[in-house]
Amino acid sequence: LTAEGPAGPLASGAPVTVTIKVDKFTNIGTLQFSVNWDPAELQLDNNTPVTIDDDAPLIGTPASGELTYTWLDADFPDYGVTLPDGTTILTLNFTVLAAAPTTGINVDITDTPTIVDATDVNFATVPVTLMNLVNFDVSAPVVVKPFVFVANKITLERTKQHTPDGDMHSNGTLTVSKGDPSTYNSNLTAVGKITINKENTINGNVKAPSVSNSGTINGTKTIGPVANEPLPSLSYGSISGPNKTVAKGKSLTLAPDDYGIVTVNSGGTLKLSSGEYFMKELRGASSGIVIEIDLSSGDPVTINVESNLQLGKEAEIRLLPNGESDSELVTFNTLQTSSVSFGKEAYLLGSFNAPNAKVTLVKNTQLRGAICAKEIYVERDCLFLHHESLGSLPGPGDLPKSSFDDDEQQETSNQLPVTSYQLEQNYPNPFNPSTTISFQLPENSDVTLSIYNTNGQLVKKLVAGTMNAGQHTLVWDATNERGERVASGVYLYVLKAGEFVAQRKLVLMK
């Protein structure tokens, strides 16, 4: 008998689901046991026993914090039942009463008040092994700051979009690159230096110990100390569970639970709902994926990722039934130290917490919500709004785009079809601070593109997932998996796509 529950910390008031499962349930005629919990920590809301071989178990609640389970097979002469390993026979739904911080909350299968006992078809006692795996903590919920961006370093490239809105805070430097011209309805604060380059208008106040301004500040510029804003603390640790894959162009519905690697292929739709999810990885780097979240209950959803959160080109977060007005109900957390990239022309709704990673909004991305990260880099022509900003985003695929991007090869309708795998030489080379790597795929392929040093040690994985046929370009910013700038020197970049493998050298100069 196994009791299973949530993998990570929960907030006070959160719902909790505990399941009782069986293994090696072979030719069993009777089963009984008790379930215990601390009623000061958890409130039992309901229980759902599974009818076995047309016989419903008897459930009792003799005292607060106790539940008893008794089942017997009433069929004669066909006495005895066999169930597949992992079958859930009882589901318990609780509400967390304990206040934060509380550690070591348990829901256990016990001998009190009803002893654990099972018999087989010969009425002989069968030994029962108990595995009590429910042990979680109650912590304060992640606080979303009243900022659209909070990080230890923030860099904004130029944008023509009208008009990014939301306050920004950096615990280090905050740089607004040369505008297009660009306007931001934002208050800017930084513990380090704020740099505002020309052709930028800041409709708000600016405060930092050092401010370099070549633009226009339509507010108060204050030179003075600024307090540090702590990034969210995430501590749910290692996650395990079944791997799930959304096939190309198909959909898959997942209930709140623990999962391994969740992969969404091109054009696929991953359907989620209110509750808490734990995923080893959420691989959504393929183009045109949709994460559809049903929020009709009015309850929030939290998606906790351990090691890899990626959303590719034209990815969409779709909230039902109210769209972007429910963005505050959605939170994505990731513990990863590797970079988080949200692909070109993505449509993002929610709060994104990546306190150990660099988060990049790729060109023409739309965001309503907030990002808290180690570093935030916003590429050209993105539009971002805080949860509480007035107005709305244009919608998926509706953000105005430049007719031609001067830092990306223009795609034309008469472009020759790709007929072979190819890895191009990076440009520029040598380079500083970033370089572009181009490659082509003749068919949809599982792709990895990685940077290695000359000792063969992995420096950074730029791509890991399924990509469409065609030409592709990626930028390496000379950082490692931890977001740290690497030393100057010679590096190798290696493309693996199906059976195809190719590598080239690049040179970083400082």
Image (cartoon, rainbow, N blue to C red):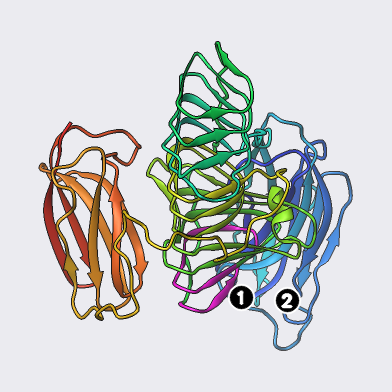
Please tell me whether residue 269 belongs to the stretch shown in magenta. yes
Is 490 drawn above or below residue 153 in the view shown?
A: below
Report the residue marked by disc 1: 83
**Residue 429 at x, y percent in the picture:** 14, 47
Q: Is residue 132 visible?
A: no
Q: Which image quarter holds the N terminus?
A: bottom right
Q: What residue type is labelled 2?
A: Ile
Q: Which residue is drawn at 23% across and 34% down?
A: 486
> What residue sits 60% from the left and 46% below the top?
163
On screen, residue 346 versus residue 90, left or right, reads: left
Disc 2 + disc 1, Cβ < 8 Å? yes
User: Distance from label 2 to label 1 (Cα)?
Assistant: 9 Å
Q: Nearer the viewer, residue 469 or 186?
A: 186
Q: Which of 491 and 510 is in front in this view?
A: 510
Task: Judge by depth and name the residue closer to the eye, 374 or 261.
Answer: 374
Q: Name the residue under label 2.
A: 52
Q: Which residue, as the protein is rendered here, is positioned at the far top?
A: 224
> Is 104 above or below relative to 311?
above
x and y, in percent, of residue 117 in the image: 69, 59
Q: What stretch is highlighted in magenta?
A: 248-270
Tell me if residue 56 comes above or below residue 275 in the rendering: below
**At label 1, which amino acid type do we have?**
Leu
Quarter the C terminus occupies: top left
* SS state under label 1: loop
Dividing the picture into quadrants, the one containing residue 499 is: bottom left
Quadrant of residue 59 within the rendered picture: bottom right
